[in-house]
Image (spheres, rainbow, N blue to C red):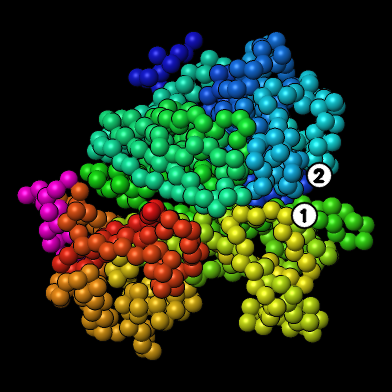
């Protein structure tokens, strides 16, 4: 018999990798089974699901790459099932369903989990788990998002751990009828539950085939070794980061019915091979739908840690043991019953992801390991801007619920090696896909007018942030619909890094009583320029029960990702290409990037561009109260991969500017040696052509702080904060 002790110093790497890849392939095949048996475009088109395999103790073997957020909720669901149901109540062919964030770890009630035990003979050896966003789960608002809810009891039918939906392979009819009686789309709902069971059955078959091929003892020893090796690699990466404490905060915009900012605070402590994330100081839980379940918090944090430190590490339980989370109960990041929770993962959860990304940026940039140092990035536009439409369609009055997955098309943060990706999704959901326009139009009573990139959404920088979507549609086949809206990032945008600028926010507007029918009736394509509206209503970030009629147009835009590096350090050739692609206007090419365009082959005048950039840097100094001309840069076009564009200490222990090598002092924080300026974020960013919602609530102001090198005026740092009276 081969044990883990035997393998540590003498294992076969081929066997280790074959077993690991087999498990990864199994969870991917489970996902394929779910897609092919589901009838919901949320699953088939947008891939809002996950599949996973766990051992008998609830430790994760492998996880599909569709939605990283569910890493936390899946693990909590399996462990809480084990804590709830006794061993005699679990038999081959059983499946358990749950969706309650408070007791089963779900991200929110629509993210429903089905867990099926795996038996080798009479021995429990693991679990197959599937989770998917179901179109409706009951409650006060169609679609399961309830901005008006004041407690969790009004949000959905709550299914705790231990609810058996299949008993020895047969549906439990009483449970099926109970669920079907409480949801608005019972046929679609039940079919999606069956698709998750089918996915689990696929996983069980393939898992048992794998054990049969390698033998259970060999399989168990090699998977245990895989846990240890994954943990070891991640801890080695943490050791490459200097020990220290890093702190920051972000803000949730409203709770669904109150326009109040809620604080998400995090202190990250790096100590040798361990990272601790402490959320002490976050706001108390609220009576609105933005409270984040603990399961969603775990997934939100893991979604930032894994691509930063474990980008090439096979994901399993070992990765999760290298960091620790402290989240006080009764707060917005770990609420208790009766806190409503239906949008906590897409508001507070993604704020936690942004925070962890920000803190890891600050930590890894100080690493001596160049590969680790290059994992820095602008923050993603993490802001699922949801629109859920419901109503009656056609002459037969069939009820529909449409959760438009276009809301996931936000831009990603810029990286040291490239611009951010456009319309790419959340950092927690990088496996998601945008729905096909024709598929949405076929299934739902809607006609798209446009779906394009929002060029006013990305953060400017040496590497530019990714752009979000801009889209519009009109009802087609229905007289009116009720709209539920939520927009987590409208006024408090994601940061850039290393002098890259913050990105834009998201939003909605309803164009009322338009000429859309006349345009379509005459065969004229309804471009934004041709579309006339009696009134344009800018909607609040969160709303429920708004009415959209067939003469109205629904218009939404999604935020982009933060930039990386001072825009004046961007390669002029990339700016020329951006202008050619209509991603950047000619005006902004000169104003923001300092590029003087021409009509010749290169598209720009190199000498004039150099002069223009020097003029802009000198103007920055004058705006900050300095009369000096800006010092020339040592390298006007640095190699971003090597330089990373952040100050470092010289041999004398003094901080130096990465652009001109001027000294910034020898204190603990290089920001103390910079020239700083503060602006209203709305005025500053809209002046740079970036769309943002103005927040004018008394006593609160969203500010944007900039830090310049006092010698060359290179922008070294830009940040967002909320100033309170």
Residue appearing at x 54%, y 47% in the figure: 347
Question: Where residue 104 sits in the image (x, y, percent)?
Answer: 62, 28
Residue appearing at x 77%, y 26% in the figure: 165
Q: Is residue 657 magenta?
A: yes
Task: Looking at the image, tell me whether mark 1 or mark 2 is earlier in sequence order.
Answer: 2
Helix, strand, or loop for circle 2?
loop
Q: In this image, 688 relative to 338: left or right?
A: left
Helix, strand, or loop for circle 1?
strand
How far apart marks 1 and 2 lie (CA) works out to 10 Å
- Where are the magenta residues, as a range? 650-668
Q: In this image, 625 relative to 723: left or right?
A: left
Q: Which residue is mark 2?
A: 184
Vertical arrangement, residue 330 with respect to residue 155, above or below: above
Vertical arrangement, residue 493 with respect to residue 234, above or below: below
Vertical arrangement, residue 721 with respect to residue 298, above or below: below
Residue 656 visible (yes or no): no
Closer to us: 429 or 478:
478
């Amino acid at each position: 018999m081969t044990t883990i002790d035997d393998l540590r110093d003498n294992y076969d790497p081929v066997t280790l990798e074959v077993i690991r890849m087999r498990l990864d392939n199994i969870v991917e095949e489970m996902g394929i089974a779910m897609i092919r048996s589901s009838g919901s475009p949320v699953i088939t088109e947008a891939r809002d699901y996950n599949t996973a395999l766990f051992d008998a103790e609830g430790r994760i073997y492998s996880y599909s790459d569709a939605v990283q957020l569910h890493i936390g909720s899946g693990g909590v669901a399996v462990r809480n099932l084990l804590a709830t149901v006794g061993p005699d109540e679990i038999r081959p062919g059983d499946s358990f369903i749950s969706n309650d964030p408070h007791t089963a770890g779900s991200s929110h009630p629509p993210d429903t989990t089905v867990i099926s035990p795996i038996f080798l003979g009479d021995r429990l050896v693991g679990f197959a788990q599937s989770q998917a966003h179901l179109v409706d789960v009951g409650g006060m608002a169609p679609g399961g998002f309830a901005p008006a809810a004041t407690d969790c009891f009004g949000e959905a039918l709550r299914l705790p751990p231990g609810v058996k939906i299949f008993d020895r392979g047969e549906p439990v009819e009483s449970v099926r009828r109970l669920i079907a009686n409480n949801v608005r789309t019972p046929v679609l709902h039940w079919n999606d539950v069956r698709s998750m069971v089918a996915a689990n059955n696929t996983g069980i078959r393939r898992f048992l085939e794998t054990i049969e091929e390698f033998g259970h003892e060999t399989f168990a020893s090699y998977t245990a070794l895989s846990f240890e090796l994954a943990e070891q690699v991640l801890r080695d990466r943490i050791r490459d980061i200097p020990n220290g404490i890093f702190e920051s905060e972000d803000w949730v915009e409203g709770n669904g019915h109150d326009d109040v900012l809620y604080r998400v605070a995090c202190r990250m402590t790096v100590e040798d091979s361990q990272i601790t994330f402490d959320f002490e100081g976050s706001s108390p839980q609220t009576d609105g739908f933005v409270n984040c379940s603990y399961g969603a918090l775990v997934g939100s944090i893991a979604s930032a840690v894994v691509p930063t430190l474990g980008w090439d590490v096979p994901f399993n339980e070992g990765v999760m043991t290298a960091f620790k989370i402290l989240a006080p109960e009764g707060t917005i990041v770990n609420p208790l019953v009766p806190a409503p929770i239906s949008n906590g993962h897409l508001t507070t959860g993604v704020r936690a992801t942004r925070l962890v990304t920000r803190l890891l940026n600050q930590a890894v940039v100080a690493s001596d390991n160049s590969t680790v140092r290059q994992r820095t990035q602008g923050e993603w536009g993490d802001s699922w801007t949801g629109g859920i439409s419901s109503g009656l369609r056609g002459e037969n009055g069939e009820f529909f619920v449409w959760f438009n997955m276009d809301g996931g098309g936000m831009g990603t943060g810029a990286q040291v090696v490239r611009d951010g990706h456009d319309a790419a999704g959340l950092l927690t959901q990088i496996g998601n896909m945008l729905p096909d326009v024709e598929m949405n139009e076929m299934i739902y009573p809607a006609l798209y007018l446009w779906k394009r990139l929002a060029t006013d959404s990305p953060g400017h920088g040496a590497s530019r942030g990714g752009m979000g979507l801009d889209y519009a549609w009109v009802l087609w086949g229905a007289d009116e619909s009720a709209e539920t809206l939520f927009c987590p990032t409208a006024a408090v945008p994601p940061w850039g890094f290393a002098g890259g600028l913050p990105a834009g926010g998201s939003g909605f507007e309803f164009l009322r009583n338009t000429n859309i029918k006349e345009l379509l009736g005459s065969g004229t394509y309804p471009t934004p320029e041709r579309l006339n509206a009696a009134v344009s209503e800018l909607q609040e970030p969160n709303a429920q029960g708004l009415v959209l009629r067939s003469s109205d147009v629904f218009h939404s835009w999604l935020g982009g990702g933060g930039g990386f590096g001072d825009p004046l350090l961007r390669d002029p050739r990339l700016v020329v290409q951006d202008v050619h692609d209509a991603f950047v206007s000619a005006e902004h090419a000169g104003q923001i990037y300092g590029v003087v365009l021409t009509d010749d082959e290169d598209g720009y005048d190199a000498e004039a561009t150099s002069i223009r950039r020097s003029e802009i840097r000198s103007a920055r100094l004058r705006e900050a109260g300095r009369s000096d001309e800006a010092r020339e840069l040592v390298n006007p076009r640095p190699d971003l991969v090597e330089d990373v564009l952040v100050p470092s200490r010289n041999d004398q222990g003094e901080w130096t500017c990465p652009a001109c090598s001027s000294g910034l002092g020898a204190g603990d924080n290089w920001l103390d040696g910079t020239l700083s300026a503060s602006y209203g974020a709305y005025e500053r960013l809209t002046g740079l052509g970036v769309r943002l919602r103005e927040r004018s609530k008394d006593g609160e102001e969203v500010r944007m702080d900039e830090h310049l090198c006092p010698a060359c005026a290179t922008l070294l740092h830009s940040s967002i904060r909320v100033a309170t009276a």
